[in-house]
Image (tube, grey):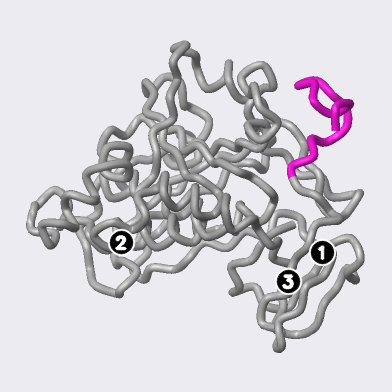
Protein backbone atom coordinates (compact mmCIF):
# COMPACT_ATOMS: atom_id res chain seq x y z
CA UNK A 1 0.00 0.00 0.00
CA UNK A 2 2.91 2.34 0.63
CA UNK A 3 3.44 2.99 -3.08
CA UNK A 4 -0.08 4.40 -3.29
CA UNK A 5 0.13 6.76 -0.34
CA UNK A 6 1.31 9.86 -2.17
CA UNK A 7 -1.38 12.42 -3.04
CA UNK A 8 0.04 12.61 -6.56
CA UNK A 9 0.35 8.87 -7.14
CA UNK A 10 -0.77 7.52 -10.50
CA UNK A 11 -2.16 4.38 -8.93
CA UNK A 12 -5.56 4.50 -7.17
CA UNK A 13 -5.57 4.66 -3.41
CA UNK A 14 -6.53 1.33 -1.87
CA UNK A 15 -9.54 1.84 0.41
CA UNK A 16 -10.83 -1.73 0.55
CA UNK A 17 -9.27 -5.16 0.53
CA UNK A 18 -10.42 -7.24 -2.46
CA UNK A 19 -9.39 -10.41 -0.62
CA UNK A 20 -11.55 -9.49 2.39
CA UNK A 21 -14.63 -11.46 3.38
CA UNK A 22 -18.05 -10.38 2.14
CA UNK A 23 -21.63 -11.58 1.82
CA UNK A 24 -24.12 -11.43 -1.03
CA UNK A 25 -27.27 -9.51 -0.01
CA UNK A 26 -30.59 -11.25 -0.70
CA UNK A 27 -29.01 -14.69 -0.92
CA UNK A 28 -30.34 -17.38 1.41
CA UNK A 29 -28.76 -19.09 3.22
CA UNK A 30 -26.22 -16.37 3.90
CA UNK A 31 -22.72 -17.44 2.94
CA UNK A 32 -19.30 -15.84 3.27
CA UNK A 33 -17.17 -15.16 0.20
CA UNK A 34 -13.92 -13.47 -0.67
CA UNK A 35 -14.66 -10.50 -2.90
CA UNK A 36 -11.89 -11.17 -5.44
CA UNK A 37 -13.04 -14.78 -5.90
CA UNK A 38 -16.61 -13.89 -6.87
CA UNK A 39 -17.81 -13.62 -10.47
CA UNK A 40 -18.25 -10.14 -11.92
CA UNK A 41 -21.99 -10.63 -12.41
CA UNK A 42 -24.28 -12.20 -9.84
CA UNK A 43 -27.80 -13.55 -9.99
CA UNK A 44 -31.22 -11.84 -10.09
CA UNK A 45 -32.09 -9.76 -7.04
CA UNK A 46 -28.45 -9.23 -6.04
CA UNK A 47 -26.74 -5.98 -6.87
CA UNK A 48 -23.25 -6.41 -5.45
CA UNK A 49 -21.23 -7.58 -2.47
CA UNK A 50 -21.41 -6.35 1.09
CA UNK A 51 -18.10 -6.40 2.99
CA UNK A 52 -18.13 -7.99 6.42
CA UNK A 53 -16.95 -5.48 9.00
CA UNK A 54 -15.18 -5.94 12.32
CA UNK A 55 -17.84 -6.09 15.10
CA UNK A 56 -15.56 -4.28 17.57
CA UNK A 57 -15.08 -1.37 15.18
CA UNK A 58 -18.82 -1.27 14.49
CA UNK A 59 -19.46 -0.93 18.22
CA UNK A 60 -16.92 1.90 18.43
CA UNK A 61 -18.50 3.79 15.52
CA UNK A 62 -21.98 3.30 16.96
CA UNK A 63 -20.76 4.70 20.28
CA UNK A 64 -19.26 7.76 18.57
CA UNK A 65 -22.53 8.32 16.70
CA UNK A 66 -24.66 8.41 19.82
CA UNK A 67 -25.65 4.74 20.10
CA UNK A 68 -29.19 5.68 19.01
CA UNK A 69 -29.86 7.62 22.20
CA UNK A 70 -33.50 8.78 22.32
CA UNK A 71 -34.08 6.73 19.19
CA UNK A 72 -31.88 8.77 16.83
CA UNK A 73 -28.39 8.48 15.42
CA UNK A 74 -26.17 11.56 15.31
CA UNK A 75 -22.98 12.41 13.47
CA UNK A 76 -19.70 13.61 14.91
CA UNK A 77 -17.99 16.99 14.46
CA UNK A 78 -14.96 17.08 12.18
CA UNK A 79 -12.21 18.82 14.11
CA UNK A 80 -10.27 21.21 11.85
CA UNK A 81 -7.77 22.32 14.46
CA UNK A 82 -5.42 23.87 11.88
CA UNK A 83 -8.17 26.05 10.37
CA UNK A 84 -7.50 24.78 6.86
CA UNK A 85 -9.81 24.92 3.85
CA UNK A 86 -11.41 21.76 2.42
CA UNK A 87 -9.21 22.16 -0.67
CA UNK A 88 -6.15 22.05 1.57
CA UNK A 89 -7.22 18.94 3.47
CA UNK A 90 -8.90 16.90 0.72
CA UNK A 91 -7.86 15.99 -2.81
CA UNK A 92 -9.82 14.42 -5.67
CA UNK A 93 -8.21 11.06 -6.37
CA UNK A 94 -9.00 7.65 -7.81
CA UNK A 95 -9.74 4.64 -5.60
CA UNK A 96 -9.55 0.91 -6.19
CA UNK A 97 -12.53 -1.39 -6.83
CA UNK A 98 -12.90 -5.05 -7.72
CA UNK A 99 -12.57 -4.02 -11.36
CA UNK A 100 -9.16 -2.91 -12.62
CA UNK A 101 -10.73 -0.66 -15.26
CA UNK A 102 -13.13 1.06 -12.83
CA UNK A 103 -11.32 3.53 -10.58
CA UNK A 104 -13.77 6.32 -9.64
CA UNK A 105 -12.57 9.57 -8.14
CA UNK A 106 -13.45 10.68 -4.63
CA UNK A 107 -12.56 13.61 -2.40
CA UNK A 108 -10.19 11.96 0.09
CA UNK A 109 -8.06 13.23 2.89
CA UNK A 110 -4.46 14.13 2.06
CA UNK A 111 -1.89 11.82 3.57
CA UNK A 112 -0.22 14.60 5.60
CA UNK A 113 -3.46 14.97 7.58
CA UNK A 114 -3.91 11.22 8.11
CA UNK A 115 -1.36 10.19 10.76
CA UNK A 116 -2.75 6.64 10.99
CA UNK A 117 -3.33 4.19 8.14
CA UNK A 118 -7.01 4.00 9.08
CA UNK A 119 -7.30 7.79 8.67
CA UNK A 120 -6.44 7.46 4.97
CA UNK A 121 -9.88 5.94 4.45
CA UNK A 122 -11.63 9.28 4.96
CA UNK A 123 -13.85 10.62 2.16
CA UNK A 124 -15.57 13.99 1.84
CA UNK A 125 -18.86 15.11 0.30
CA UNK A 126 -19.61 18.77 -0.45
CA UNK A 127 -23.33 19.67 -0.67
CA UNK A 128 -24.69 22.98 -1.90
CA UNK A 129 -28.25 24.26 -1.93
CA UNK A 130 -30.66 26.95 -2.96
CA UNK A 131 -34.29 27.18 -1.86
CA UNK A 132 -35.60 25.12 -4.77
CA UNK A 133 -32.80 22.64 -5.40
CA UNK A 134 -29.83 20.80 -3.97
CA UNK A 135 -26.59 19.26 -5.19
CA UNK A 136 -23.53 17.49 -3.86
CA UNK A 137 -20.03 16.84 -5.19
CA UNK A 138 -17.90 13.75 -4.57
CA UNK A 139 -14.94 14.67 -6.81
CA UNK A 140 -13.55 17.44 -9.03
CA UNK A 141 -14.43 15.84 -12.35
CA UNK A 142 -17.08 17.15 -14.75
CA UNK A 143 -19.45 14.33 -13.75
CA UNK A 144 -18.67 14.37 -10.04
CA UNK A 145 -21.61 16.62 -9.04
CA UNK A 146 -25.23 15.48 -8.77
CA UNK A 147 -28.22 17.80 -8.48
CA UNK A 148 -31.97 17.57 -8.13
CA UNK A 149 -35.03 19.76 -7.67
CA UNK A 150 -36.27 19.80 -4.07
CA UNK A 151 -39.47 17.78 -3.82
CA UNK A 152 -42.62 19.25 -2.31
CA UNK A 153 -43.32 16.02 -0.45
CA UNK A 154 -41.15 14.22 2.08
CA UNK A 155 -40.26 10.53 2.51
CA UNK A 156 -43.65 9.83 4.11
CA UNK A 157 -45.56 11.49 1.26
CA UNK A 158 -46.79 14.47 3.30
CA UNK A 159 -46.47 17.94 1.69
CA UNK A 160 -43.87 20.34 3.04
CA UNK A 161 -42.91 23.96 2.55
CA UNK A 162 -39.94 24.34 0.18
CA UNK A 163 -37.29 26.25 2.12
CA UNK A 164 -33.54 26.76 2.01
CA UNK A 165 -33.09 24.86 5.27
CA UNK A 166 -35.06 21.92 3.95
CA UNK A 167 -32.90 21.87 0.82
CA UNK A 168 -29.75 21.90 2.97
CA UNK A 169 -30.95 18.87 4.87
CA UNK A 170 -32.23 17.11 1.74
CA UNK A 171 -28.79 17.42 0.12
CA UNK A 172 -27.17 15.39 2.91
CA UNK A 173 -29.95 12.80 2.87
CA UNK A 174 -29.64 12.62 -0.92
CA UNK A 175 -25.92 11.95 -0.73
CA UNK A 176 -26.17 9.25 1.95
CA UNK A 177 -29.08 7.46 0.26
CA UNK A 178 -27.58 7.60 -3.23
CA UNK A 179 -25.07 4.85 -2.65
CA UNK A 180 -23.79 2.67 0.21
CA UNK A 181 -20.54 4.61 0.30
CA UNK A 182 -19.25 2.64 3.28
CA UNK A 183 -19.16 -0.41 0.97
CA UNK A 184 -16.22 1.17 -0.86
CA UNK A 185 -14.15 0.73 2.30
CA UNK A 186 -14.34 4.19 3.92
CA UNK A 187 -13.95 4.39 7.70
CA UNK A 188 -15.24 7.95 7.79
CA UNK A 189 -17.18 10.33 5.57
CA UNK A 190 -17.00 14.08 6.18
CA UNK A 191 -19.95 16.21 5.04
CA UNK A 192 -18.55 19.68 4.32
CA UNK A 193 -21.27 22.32 4.42
CA UNK A 194 -21.86 25.99 5.23
CA UNK A 195 -25.16 25.12 6.96
CA UNK A 196 -25.06 25.63 10.72
CA UNK A 197 -28.63 24.28 10.76
CA UNK A 198 -27.46 20.93 9.36
CA UNK A 199 -24.23 20.65 11.35
CA UNK A 200 -25.71 21.53 14.75
CA UNK A 201 -28.88 19.53 14.09
CA UNK A 202 -27.10 16.40 12.87
CA UNK A 203 -24.47 16.33 15.63
CA UNK A 204 -26.37 17.36 18.76
CA UNK A 205 -29.73 19.11 18.47
CA UNK A 206 -31.49 16.11 16.96
CA UNK A 207 -31.04 14.23 20.24
CA UNK A 208 -32.60 17.16 22.11
CA UNK A 209 -35.53 17.34 19.69
CA UNK A 210 -36.13 13.60 19.97
CA UNK A 211 -35.88 13.65 23.77
CA UNK A 212 -38.62 16.33 23.79
CA UNK A 213 -40.77 14.29 21.42
CA UNK A 214 -40.04 16.72 18.57
CA UNK A 215 -42.06 19.53 20.17
CA UNK A 216 -39.56 22.28 19.29
CA UNK A 217 -40.62 24.04 16.05
CA UNK A 218 -37.08 24.21 14.63
CA UNK A 219 -36.85 20.42 14.67
CA UNK A 220 -40.50 19.62 14.02
CA UNK A 221 -40.65 21.56 10.74
CA UNK A 222 -38.42 19.06 8.96
CA UNK A 223 -38.86 16.10 11.25
CA UNK A 224 -39.38 13.69 8.34
CA UNK A 225 -35.97 14.48 6.85
CA UNK A 226 -34.22 14.52 10.22
CA UNK A 227 -35.58 11.06 10.99
CA UNK A 228 -34.55 9.84 7.53
CA UNK A 229 -31.06 11.25 8.11
CA UNK A 230 -30.93 9.46 11.46
CA UNK A 231 -31.97 6.16 9.85
CA UNK A 232 -29.33 6.48 7.16
CA UNK A 233 -26.59 7.34 9.66
CA UNK A 234 -27.58 4.20 11.58
CA UNK A 235 -27.01 2.15 8.42
CA UNK A 236 -23.57 3.69 8.01
CA UNK A 237 -22.73 3.05 11.67
CA UNK A 238 -23.67 -0.60 11.17
CA UNK A 239 -21.27 -0.60 8.22
CA UNK A 240 -18.51 0.77 10.52
CA UNK A 241 -18.45 4.11 8.70
CA UNK A 242 -18.51 7.24 10.86
CA UNK A 243 -20.41 10.25 9.50
CA UNK A 244 -18.87 13.60 10.46
CA UNK A 245 -19.92 17.18 9.73
CA UNK A 246 -17.69 20.16 9.07
CA UNK A 247 -19.13 23.68 8.95
CA UNK A 248 -17.15 26.00 6.68
CA UNK A 249 -17.59 29.51 5.18
CA UNK A 250 -19.76 29.56 2.08
CA UNK A 251 -17.00 30.83 -0.21
CA UNK A 252 -15.07 27.60 0.46
CA UNK A 253 -17.74 25.47 -1.26
CA UNK A 254 -18.74 26.67 -4.70
CA UNK A 255 -18.51 23.65 -7.02
CA UNK A 256 -22.04 22.33 -6.47
CA UNK A 257 -23.59 25.81 -6.37
CA UNK A 258 -24.02 26.16 -10.12
CA UNK A 259 -25.63 22.72 -10.37
CA UNK A 260 -28.10 23.54 -7.58
CA UNK A 261 -29.03 26.79 -9.33
CA UNK A 262 -29.44 25.07 -12.68
CA UNK A 263 -32.03 22.57 -11.44
CA UNK A 264 -34.19 25.41 -10.14
CA UNK A 265 -35.08 26.18 -13.74
CA UNK A 266 -36.68 22.74 -14.08
CA UNK A 267 -40.31 21.92 -13.36
CA UNK A 268 -41.41 21.51 -9.76
CA UNK A 269 -41.25 17.99 -8.36
CA UNK A 270 -44.08 16.77 -6.18
CA UNK A 271 -43.21 13.24 -5.05
CA UNK A 272 -40.17 12.34 -2.98
CA UNK A 273 -37.89 9.79 -4.62
CA UNK A 274 -34.60 8.38 -3.42
CA UNK A 275 -31.43 9.16 -5.32
CA UNK A 276 -29.65 6.14 -6.77
CA UNK A 277 -26.18 6.44 -8.29
CA UNK A 278 -24.47 3.51 -9.97
CA UNK A 279 -21.38 5.56 -10.86
CA UNK A 280 -19.94 3.62 -13.79
CA UNK A 281 -20.61 0.16 -12.41
CA UNK A 282 -21.04 -2.85 -14.71
CA UNK A 283 -24.67 -3.71 -15.59
CA UNK A 284 -26.74 -4.77 -12.59
CA UNK A 285 -30.15 -6.26 -12.04
CA UNK A 286 -31.76 -4.66 -9.01
CA UNK A 287 -31.18 -0.90 -8.95
CA UNK A 288 -33.31 -0.39 -5.83
CA UNK A 289 -30.84 -2.12 -3.51
CA UNK A 290 -28.71 -0.01 -1.19
CA UNK A 291 -25.54 -2.05 -1.41
CA UNK A 292 -23.74 -0.01 -4.08
CA UNK A 293 -20.34 -1.15 -2.90
CA UNK A 294 -18.01 -1.21 -5.86
Quadrant where the C terminus sits is bottom right
Q: What secondary structure is found at the residue carrying circle 2?
A: helix
Provide residue 168's location: percent of width, then percent of height: 34, 44
**Residue wearing tag 1:** 282
- Residue 269, numbered circle: none
**Residue wearing tag 2:** 227
Q: CA distance from mark 1 to mark 3?
A: 19 Å
Classify mark 1: residues with Cα within 10 Å, few (<14), some (14-19) or many (20+): few
- Of the numbered discs 2 and 1, the one sitting upstream in the chain is 2
Which region of the structure is painted magenta?
A: 1-15
- Of the numbered discs 1 and 3, the one sitting upstream in the chain is 3
Q: CA distance from mark 3 to mark 2?
A: 28 Å
Q: Left or right: where does residue 226 sit relative to residue 101? A: left
Residue drawn at x 36%, y 29% as measured from the top left: 194
Provide residue 211's location: percent of width, then percent of height: 15, 57
Q: Is residue 268 visible?
A: no
Check the image and report above or below for 83 versus 71.
above
**Residue wearing tag 3:** 23
Answer yes or no: do the residues labelled 2 and 1 have beta carbons within 8 Å? no
Q: What secondary structure is found at the residue carrying circle 1?
A: loop
Is 2 magenta? The answer is yes
Q: Left or right: where does residue 262 sit relative to residue 283? A: left
Q: Is residue 54 visible?
A: yes
Residue drawn at x 76%, y 55% as measured from the top left: 280
Residue drawn at x 64%, y 55% as measured from the top left: 54
Provide residue 70's location: percent of width, then percent of height: 23, 59
Amino acid sequence: MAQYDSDDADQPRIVHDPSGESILPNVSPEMTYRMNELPLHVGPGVLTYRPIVNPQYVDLVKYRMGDKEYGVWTGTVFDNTENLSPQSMFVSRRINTLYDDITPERFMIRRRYAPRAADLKTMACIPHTVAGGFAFSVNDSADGTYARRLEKEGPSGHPNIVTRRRAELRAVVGFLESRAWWGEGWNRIVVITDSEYVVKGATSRMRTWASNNWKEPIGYLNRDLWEELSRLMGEYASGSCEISFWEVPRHWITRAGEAANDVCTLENVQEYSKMRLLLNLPPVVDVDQTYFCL
